Image (cartoon, rainbow, N blue to C red):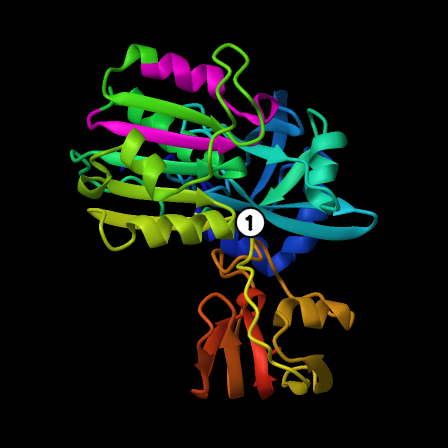
């Protein structure tokens, strides 16, 4: 698997000398008076193009600075922007494969109440500079993938999968791929014309766009069903012989896993919404923050990230779905519940992800 990599060309000795004389934040302050993407070591990216992709969705093409270390098709990146004086970070899938010119792209759907998605969709302009983190995510092509593949996308879950399709097409479609893509209406389909054109050009690539809230006027066909066994059997009868990647809301991913997780050749999935779980953990718990010395009372069963933010704290965070590990921290004592699985974990001196962990009793965190 290839990836676009960038490395610093500044001699190491010069870097050490400069670091001894100038603090990185001071360097950034003055360097950005000349170019807003110049920093000591922070990856930043300038928006060089924006284009509509579907209703309430746009693609932003970004030119990263030399501190960006590259990515693989199918991965995500944390994107940060300053909004109303506060830095807001969220995770976005990279919707294009690595390019020779080093540009990268994210496709942003405007989410009601979403601070960053609304800002990027409504206000971000060509020339604006965003902070970006390192690429992460494991839903990438393996070194060898000559067997058949089944890609399942719902809503915004298409973005990492279209990057995989684009890279696969650039290689001549070396293995059969079928993509099933659910959206509510035609207006919400992203990349549909491109995907259908690729299907026409490559016999080993098939795409089915399934609209769940719209009747096909040409054929008077009723809205498509959501993912189920009968639909899979009809569209992909050999699904059990394929490797599967699925991406979409947590309910969609749960259904895909239930249908194919034990029967497919292999199965990997990522959800772009937190799992909707209820474990009926009532009452409150005491959280001791060891580094700051603070003691807080939070609701049991609620995401620790949400609970801490409600008390005015701002822990580092990104995807808020348990993927990027930005919010990972140490736990020295107490019991927590993993909100993605329901498992209660009591081992001391362990790590947890705040976004998908809840207090199941009094705990101590390395914060």
Q: Residues within 10 Å of mark 1 (few under 14, many from 20)?
A: some
> Residue 23 lies in what quarter of the image?
bottom right
Residue 274 visible within the image: yes
Q: Quadrant of the C terminus?
A: bottom right
The residue stretch that appears in magenta: 174-199
Residue under pointer 1:
41
Q: Quadrant of residue 298?
A: bottom right
Residue 136 spot, x, y in % from top left: 44, 49
Determine if the magenta segment contains residue 101: no
Q: Is residue 176 left or right of residue 57?
A: left
Which residue is at 30% across, 27% downward? 168
Q: Nearer the viewer, residue 215 or 19?
A: 215
- Quadrant including the N terminus: top left
Does residue 78 lie above or below 308 as drawn? above
Q: Residue at x 63, y 86 (%)?
A: 290
Residue 137 picture location, percent across and down: 41, 49
In this orientation, which residue lies closer to the viewer: 335 or 206?
Answer: 206
Residue at the image point whose x is 72% and y is 27% from the top: 125
The location of residue 99, given as percent across then percent down, is 41, 26
Q: Can residue 73 be seen in this snapshot?
A: no
- Left of 329 or right of it: where is 314? right
């Amino acid at each position: 698997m290839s990836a676009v990599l960038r490395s610093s060309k500044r001699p190491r000795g010069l870097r050490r000398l400069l670091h001894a004389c100038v603090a990185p934040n001071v360097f950034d302050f003055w360097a950005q008076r000349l170019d807003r993407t110049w920093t000591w070591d922070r990856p930043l990216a300038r928006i060089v193009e924006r284009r509509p992709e579907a209703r309430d969705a746009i693609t932003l093409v970004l030119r990263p600075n030399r501190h960006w270390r590259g990515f693989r098709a199918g991965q995500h990146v944390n994107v940060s922007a300053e909004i109303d004086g506060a830095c807001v970070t969220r995770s976005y899938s990279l919707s294009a494969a690595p390019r020779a010119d080093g540009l990268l792209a994210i496709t942003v759907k405007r989410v009601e109440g979403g601070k960053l998605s609304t800002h990027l969709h409504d206000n971000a302009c060509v020339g604006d500079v965003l902070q970006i983190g390192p690429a992460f995510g494991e839903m990438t092509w393996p070194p060898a993938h000559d067997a058949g593949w089944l890609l399942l996308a719902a809503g915004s879950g298409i973005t990492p999968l279209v990057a995989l399709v684009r890279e696969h097409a650039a290689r001549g479609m070396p293995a059969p791929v079928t993509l099933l893509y659910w959206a509510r209406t035609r207006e919400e389909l992203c990349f549909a014309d491109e995907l259908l054109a690729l299907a026409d050009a490559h016999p080993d690539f098939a795409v089915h766009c399934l609209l769940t809230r719209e009747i096909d006027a040409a054929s008077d066909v009723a809205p498509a069903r959501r993912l189920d066994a009968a639909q899979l059997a009809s569209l992909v009868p050999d699904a059990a012989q394929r490797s599967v990647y699925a991406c979409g809301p947590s309910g969609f991913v749960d259904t895909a896993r239930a249908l194919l997780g034990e029967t497919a050749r292999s199965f990997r999935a990522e959800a772009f919404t937190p799992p909707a779980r209820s474990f009926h953990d009532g009452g409150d718990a005491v959280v001791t923050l060891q580094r700051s010395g603070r003691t807080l009372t939070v609701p049991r069963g609620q995401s620790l990230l949400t609970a801490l933010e409600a008390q005015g704290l701002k822990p580092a965070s990104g995807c808020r779905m348990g993927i990027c590990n930005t919010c990972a921290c140490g736990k020295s004592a107490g019991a927590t519940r993993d909100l993605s699985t329901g498992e209660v974990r009591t081992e001391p001196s362990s790590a947890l992800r705040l976004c998908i962990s809840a207090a199941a009793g009094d705990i101590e965190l390395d914060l």
